[in-house]
Image (spheres, grey):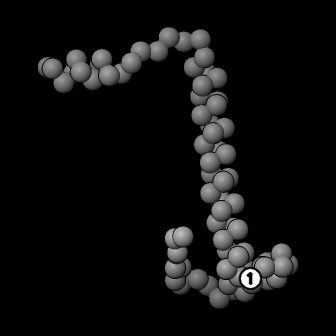
Amino acid sequence: MSQVLVRGLDPDVVERLKQRAKQHGRSLQAELKAVIEQAARSEMRRARTLAAQIRKRLAGRSHHDSADLLAEDRSR
């Protein structure tokens, strides 16, 4: 399992995180792990939503393999 060290946190931020951990009935480390994991999941959801929106906008259009264009450009 990976480890991360965060330096220079404002003491007020750490205190708020400790309070949040206590509210959730977990240690500060467990709370921080949960916060980071939730943030990573949230980013992935946003990326998937954006990809779905782009696919929807491009639906019905013809698409070409860019490899052919790259090969043609490289041969110049």
Is 18 left or right of 50, judged from the image as shown? Answer: right
Question: Could you tell me if residue 67 is visible in this image?
Answer: yes
Q: The N terminus appears in which quarter of the rendering? A: bottom right
Find numbered disc 1 in the image and state the secondary structure of the residue it sits on: loop
Is 41 left or right of 6, judged from the image as shown? Answer: right
Q: Position of residue 22 (x, y in %)?
A: 82, 82
The residue positioned 22% from the left and 17% from the top of the image is 72
Q: Position of residue 59 (x, y in %)?
A: 60, 17
Identify residue type, mark 1: Ser
The residue positioned 47% from the left and 15% from the top of the image is 63
Q: Residues within 10 Å of mark 1 (few under 14, many from 20)?
A: some
Nearest the eye: 52 or 30: 30
Q: Quadrant of residue 50?
A: top right
From what the image shows, is residue 39 above or below residue 11?
above
The residue positioned 72% from the left and 75% from the top of the image is 31
Is 38 left or right of 23, judged from the image as shown? Answer: left
The residue that disc 1 covers is 27
Q: Quadrant of residue 38?
A: bottom right
Q: Position of residue 7 (x, y in %)?
A: 52, 83
